[in-house]
Structures are given as C-alpha cells and as structure tokens.
Image (cartoon, grey):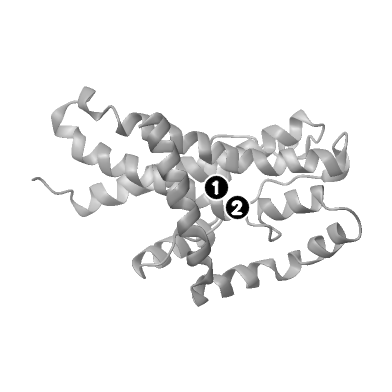
Amino acid sequence: MEELTLIQKITAYAIPIIFAITVHEAAHGYAAKYFGDMTAHYLGRISLNPLKHIDPVGTIILPAVTIMLGGILFGWAKPVPVNFSNLRNPKKNMMWVALAGPFSNLLMAIFWTFVFARLQFFPENSIIFLSAMCLAGIQINLILMVLNLLPIPPLDGGRVAVSLLPYPWSSYVENLERYGLFIIIFLLFSGVLGSILFPLINISKSIIFTIFG
C-alpha cells in the first residue's frame, strides 16, 4: 500500500488543525456579536482568516512538540476578545458564547466523519491522503471539544461553570483563571489530563461514527 510522504502527513494534519482553531475562535466572536458584544467585530477578529487567530507558540510550536512526544495534542490560539459586560445578559449569555467554540468543533468532527464514510466517491489516488486528513480532523476536533469543556478557566468549560454556578461559587471558579494554564499543564504532564480526556473522546467518536459513519 502506498504511504504518505512527510510533507503529505504534515499537510494532512495541518489543514484540519488550522480549520479547527480558526472556526472555533470565529464562533466565539459570532456568538458574542449575536448577544450584543461588538468587541471582536470592531477588532476584525470575527474572521475565517487563520492568520488572525494563530499564536506562534501555542498554535504551532507547542502542538508539534506534544505530538512528537506522543502526548495529547495541546496548544492554543489567540483568544477572541469578548467583553462580557457588553452582553445583553452577561451571566446567561456568557455560557452560549463559551459553548459556541466547542460546538463548532463538534460540527467539524461530524463533517470529517461524513467525508471519511464516503471516500469511495473520491478519486482512488487521493483516498489514502484524504483518509489520513479525515481521521486527523475527527481526532483534533474531538480533542479540542472535550478539552475546552473541562470546567477550568480560561477554558470554555470554565466560562460555562461561572455562568451556571450561583454566587459565591461562580466567583471562586472565576478567580481560578490566573492559575488555569498552570493547572492544565500540570494535569497534562502528570498524565491525569489524558486519563480524563481519552475515554470521553473515544465515547464521542463512537457516537459520531454510529450516527454519521
């Protein structure tokens, strides 16, 4: 069986990663605009142009290192700025703005699954490459979806927790944001993050494949 070249493998991963982070961030901006905050709109961040969302370290270097080390894909994009006080109902609308990103990753995972299940309709010489790209797209988007739903600020799940929890518990969670990145990195390198995420990712993958594959 023909194998992919290194460039083809890089491309097969790069395309889904770029789309995953770009659409995720743009979705936050669209949702914020819908609920009344125009900050991202005025700054030109509601865009499908990847260059507006790529962070050199978090989007390129760190994910490449974690993949090469055999760990879970980990990184970040430049977050779309949202002024929650501008939302029509800040505490309630915060949840929907936060959920817009992971929901966009769910939709993209479904899209890649749909394409993967129909590879027989594509030219034969493109099937190996497209297969690798679809599988990468499914995995990357499910990782981003599940990871971002963890109730740790500044992840989207942390925003959802702040939105749903009553005071003062919401304030306690919100105050964790300054330590959030350190908590996530600790969980990553201790192996705890993988043990939490991989079962949830596999369950999500099984459900999506059953319905759309």
Q: Residue at x 22, y 54 (%)?
A: 6
Quadrant housing residue 60 = bottom left
Quadrant housing residue 206 = top left
Q: Residue at x 18, y 51 (%)?
A: 5
Q: Residue at x 52, y 40 (%)?
A: 105
Position of 211 relative to 146 (above/below): above
Identified by mark 1, the residue type is Met
Q: Which residue is mark 2?
A: 148
Residue 35 placement (x, y as % from top left):
79, 31
> Disc 2 versus disc 1: distance between alpha carbons?
5 Å
Position of 102 relative to 159 (above/below): above
Q: Which residue is mark 1?
A: 145
Q: Residue at x 70, y 58 (%)?
A: 154
Visible in this render: residue 25? no
Position of 34 relative to 172 (above/below): above
In which quadrant of the rendered image does the N terminus lie? top left
Residue 137 placement (x, y as % from top left):
39, 43
Residue 169 placement (x, y as % from top left):
86, 61
